[in-house]
């Protein structure tokens, strides 16, 4: 039974593979085959099912489904490459002959065959040229960088250099032994390059152009076995013999390194040949047997100080192995793909018993690997559907890499397949086929090179998938992302969601007129559906949607019809209030909110500027939210008069207190009228605020405030009010008798500096030693201490009297010292200022040649000595001739300045 199940499962895999094969023959694109590991898992799951046959049929079915799901999960890995079989003329060529080697560049593809022919083809497989230079299979091909010359070699011991566009510099050489490899100088097409090429037989020989067009040969290496592979890049040549891989610097013709063969010697080199690839001029990839190495050419230090005597004779370059690892398959070709490696692989172990079922492990594979130290990580693995793969061994496969074009040619005798990195369109197609719609949508949004897909096309496929699976929430969110501003598409989406009764899911995502507005009937359809199925959702949509999108009156009528059947539906009442506000019937909306006691009433008031209605409903608003109501009343005090608010709140002392207190704190200038009421409210509600109000405000009635404080026995506030009303004697009496605070009493006496108050305080304190001591310590210089000391009764014991008397004497001496110091400072300042005044007045005043005498209007300074006379200069800097001043008097004031002062006095 177990065997039967296993064979049935494998036959299913074979059927799938046959369908894949037919598809490959009809279409040029390859797809990945089912891997062997998945097949073996199917076999394992089948055996487990057979062991559990005793269980119920339902459980067996569930386990079978789980195993299928596990297999599908393993098939979810996205391939890195896509494949295309080259057809054209190549297909007919390979029917008659077999491909033995390949060389390609960005323009052409050269195929060498088993019959010794060379076919020049374009990348579609169409024939361009054909040569027949050999009689045996072509073992290797090479081209220069420009693609002008082709080098070929064969077991017929011939090496042919053939120009594709000219016969110049073409050569046809016959060697002593079969030729396995050949390499052209990358710059062979250049006139002064030396026209060099290297031939690999049992020795490696360099040929270069000499005088008179002759070829000069140089043996580079011999005695290490046949050269089975050879690659030339830049100035470095690499070739592989049975002992290992050598790299030579062709500028100096010196071998810079030998990479010894380290894989099993049981793998013959003719059946498991080496493969070389230069990704760039300094990187070499070596794949041989079941080992892979990635090497880098390094330059030795050019600093003589760091070189030892033994290093002076070493080549200027050396090779460093960066990565090396052993694989679980045989390497048939290697190449680079970005940071990864592409390896053409052949399974080490082949199970021929499964071949009859269509699952054959002899199929070649393309593996993408990430190289690591001593190991690797497999990124992807594709099983290839190569024609006649059953007849081939690892030596029959070749891999040619076009590094710049990121293409890989897979060659076997009867087939040539090109592998390319998958484009964005290929990735999207694969993601859609595997129901990974979200990833496909993200890819089409981020990639700019997508040609066959758009956000809308992928999004529609994703939307269909979500709707088919009942994922309506995700489908509604997706509409916003893919439908954009297309009105028709949105209306189609509404119809589609309405068909499955899921408009409530779509409603939060509908466009609301910002760039696109749907027909009002569409919005009304959604609202009516929500009204019948989801009242909270209906309320949310009514609050979110602007009223101009739909016919509000129509919706109001529908809501009223529903409320007629359920009058206590608070959610619909709230929605109705919002609808009324949309058509400017704010009074109805406000009434509904107040009835519901809903805090949205404050949003309604602020949004529609309904502050004039606040005073009328202030009690209800305070009951709902006193803080929000007080904010509105204080911020819009010019619209909401305090008189109307106070009148409305007069029957609610607690609300009135909150309002007047807030008004006093925020708008003190507007609250002065109500300070008398506030005094009574503070006395009842918050006594801590009463005294600051009494001390800072002058807008309340003192008599009423005093009566309020006395009725409530508020002694402290009463004392301050009596003091403010001028009744300091009574306030002093309350301090002494009720508060019994001698320091407060002393401060009161100091403030008023009234002898009568001091006498009353002293009289009250004479029989109280503690009060006497405090008086002596705090009176300072306000009164004469003798007034207290002389009236102290004899024999009265006063604690701390000595210290108090010492303090009095100290204060007296300090006062005398301060007065003396101040007097000295004043005398010194007066003396300094007097000296400064005298020196200023005695200082010389300049008289200039153009100075005019105010009396005679002539120049003060004479033009000759005969006219010289005395000059009088005043402090105001006016200068006169002595003769111009009145005779017989000593003039002390300038005549001009005296007239100005007299005129100013008369005018004032």
Image (cartoon, grey):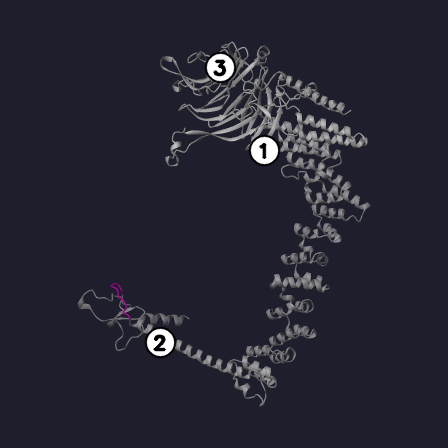
Residue matched to label 3 = 179
Mark in the foreground, 2 or 3: 3
Q: Residue furthest left?
A: 866
Q: Position of residue 608 (x, y in %)?
A: 67, 50
x and y percentages locating residue 311 in the rendered image = 40, 32
Of callouts 2 and 3, which one flags the residue occurring earlier in the amino acid sequence?
Answer: 3
**Secondary structure under badge 2?**
helix
Q: Main secondary structure of the magenta part?
A: loop
* Magenta stretch bounds: 843-851
Please say if 112 is above or below 261. above
Name the one closer to the observer, 189 or 846.
189
Q: Residues within 10 Å of mark 2 (few under 14, many from 20)?
A: few
Q: Write down the residue under mark 1.
A: 446
**Residue 588's mark?**
none
Q: Is residue 847 magenta?
A: yes
Q: Secondary structure at mark 1?
A: helix
Picture disc at residue 831: 2
Name the image quarter holding residue 895: bottom left
- Of 755 and 386, nearer the camera is 386
Mark closest to the chain's N terminus, 2 or 1:
1
In the image, residue 778 sits, relative to residue 187, either above or below, namely: below
Residue 379 or 228: which is nearer the viewer?
Answer: 228
Q: Residue at x 36, y 12 (%)?
A: 212
x and y percent of residue 462 in the render? Answer: 67, 31
Which image quarter: residue 517?
Answer: top right
Residue 422 visible here? no
When the figure is inspected, residue 181 is found, relative to residue 889, above or below; the finding is above
Which quadrant is the C terminus positioned in?
A: bottom left
Marks 2 and 1: CB-CB under 8 Å?
no
């Amino acid at each position: 039974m177990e065997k039967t199940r296993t064979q049935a499962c494998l036959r299913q895999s074979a059927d799938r593979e046959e369908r894949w094969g037919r598809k490959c023959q009809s279409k040029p694109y390859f797809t990945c085959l089912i891997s062997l590991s998945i097949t073996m898992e199917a076999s394992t799951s089948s055996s487990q099912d057979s062991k559990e046959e005793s269980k119920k049929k339902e459980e067996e079915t569930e386990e079978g489904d789980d195993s299928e799901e596990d297999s599908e999960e393993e098939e979810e890995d996205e391939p890195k490459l896509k494949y295309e079989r080259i057809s054209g003329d190549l297909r007919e060529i390979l029917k008659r002959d077999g491909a033995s080697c390949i060389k390609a560049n960005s323009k052409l593809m050269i195929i060498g065959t088993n019959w010794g022919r060379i076919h020049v083809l374009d990348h579609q497989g169409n024939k361009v040229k054909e040569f027949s230079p050999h009689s045996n299979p072509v073992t290797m091909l090479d081209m220069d960088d420009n693609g002008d010359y082709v080098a070929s070699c064969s077991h017929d011991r011939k090496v042919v250099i053939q120009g594709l566009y000219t016969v110049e510099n073409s050569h046809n050489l016959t060697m002593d032994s079969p030729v396995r490899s050949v390499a052209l100088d990358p710059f062979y097409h250049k006139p002064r390059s030396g026209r060099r090429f290297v031939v690999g037989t049992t020795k490696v020989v360099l040929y270069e152009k000499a005088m008179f067009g002759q070829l000069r040969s140089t043996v580079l290496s011999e005695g290490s076995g046949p050269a089975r592979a050879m690659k030339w890049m830049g100035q470095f040549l690499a070739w592989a013999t049975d002992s290992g891989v050598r790299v030579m610097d062709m500028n100096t013709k010196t071998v810079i390194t030998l990479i010894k063969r380290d894989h099993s010697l049981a793998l013959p080199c003719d059946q498991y040949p080496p493969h070389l690839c230069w990704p760039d001029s300094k990187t070499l990839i070596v794949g041989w047997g079941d080992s892979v190495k990635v090497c880098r050419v390094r330059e030795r230090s050019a600093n003589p100080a760091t070189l030892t005597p033994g290093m002076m004779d070493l080549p200027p370059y050396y090779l460093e192995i960066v990565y090396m690892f052993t694989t679980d398959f045989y390497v048939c070709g290697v190449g680079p793909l970005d940071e990864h490696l592409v390896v053409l692989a052949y399974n080490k172990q082949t199970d021929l018993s499964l071949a009859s079922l269509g699952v054959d492990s002899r199929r070649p594979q393309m593996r993408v690997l990430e190289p690591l130290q001593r190991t690797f990580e497999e990124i992807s693995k594709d099983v290839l559907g190569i024609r006649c793969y059953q007849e081939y061994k690892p030596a029959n496969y070749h891999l040619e890499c076009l590094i710049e074009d990121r293409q890989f040619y897979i060659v076997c005798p009867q087939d040539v397949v090109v592998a390319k990195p998958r484009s964005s369109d290929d990735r999207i197609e694969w993601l859609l086929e595997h129901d990974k719609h979200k990833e496909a949508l993200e890819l089409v949004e981020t990639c700019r090179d997508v040609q066959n897909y758009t956000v809308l096309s992928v999004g529609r496929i994703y939307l269909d998938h979500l709707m088919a699976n009942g994922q309506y929430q995700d489908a509604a969110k997706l509409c916003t992302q893919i439908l954009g501003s297309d009105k028709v598409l949105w209306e189609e989406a509404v119809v589609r969601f309405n068909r499955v009764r899921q408009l409530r899911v779509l409603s939060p995502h509908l466009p609301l007129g910002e760039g696109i507005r749907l027909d009002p009937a569409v919005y009304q359809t959604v609202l009516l559906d929500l009204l019948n199925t989801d009242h909270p959702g209906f309320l949310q949509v009514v609050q979110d949607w602007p009223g101009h999108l739909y016919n509000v009156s129509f919706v109001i009528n529908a809501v009223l019809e529903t409320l007629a059947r359920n009058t206590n539906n608070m959610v619909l009442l709230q929605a109705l209030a919002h609808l009324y506000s949309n058509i400017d019937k704010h009074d109805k909306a406000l009434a509904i909110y107040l009835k519901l006691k809903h805090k949205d009433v404050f949003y309604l008031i602020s949004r529609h500027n309904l502050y004039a209605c606040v005073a009328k409903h202030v009690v209800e608003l305070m009951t709902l939210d006193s803080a929000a109501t007080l904010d509105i009343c204080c911020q819009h005090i010019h619209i909401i008069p305090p008189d109307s608010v106070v009148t409305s709140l007069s029957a609610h002392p607690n609300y009135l207190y909150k309002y007047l207190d807030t008004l006093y704190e925020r708008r003190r200038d507007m609250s002065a009228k109500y300070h008398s009421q506030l005094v009574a409210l503070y006395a009842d509600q918050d006594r801590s605020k009463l005294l600051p109000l009494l001390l800072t405000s002058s807008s309340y009635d003192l008599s009423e405030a005093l009566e309020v404080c006395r009725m409530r026995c508020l002694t402290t506030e009463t004392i301050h009010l009596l003091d403010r009303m001028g009744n300091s004697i009574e306030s002093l009496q309350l301090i002494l008798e009720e508060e019994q605070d001698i320091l407060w009493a002393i401060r009161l006496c100091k403030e008023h500096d009234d002898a009568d108050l001091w006498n009353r305080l002293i009289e009250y304190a004479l029989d109280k030693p503690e009060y006497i001591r405090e008086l002596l310590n705090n009176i300072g210089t306000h009164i004469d201490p003798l007034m207290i000391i002389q009236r102290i009764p004899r024999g009265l014991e006063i604690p701390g009297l000595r210290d108090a008397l010492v303090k009095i004497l100290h204060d007296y001496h300090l006062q005398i010292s301060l007065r003396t110091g101040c007097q000295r400072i004043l005398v010194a300042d007066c003396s300094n200022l007097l000296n400064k005044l005298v020196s200023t007045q005695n200082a010389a005043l300049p008289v200039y040649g153009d100075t005019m005498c105010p009396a005679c209007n002539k120049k003060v300074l004479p033009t000759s000595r005969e006219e010289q006379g005395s000059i009088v200069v005043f402090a105001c800097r006016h200068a006169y001739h002595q003769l111009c001043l009145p005779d017989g008097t000593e003039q002390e004031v300038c005549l001009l300045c005296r007239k100005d002062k007299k005129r100013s006095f008369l005018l004032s």
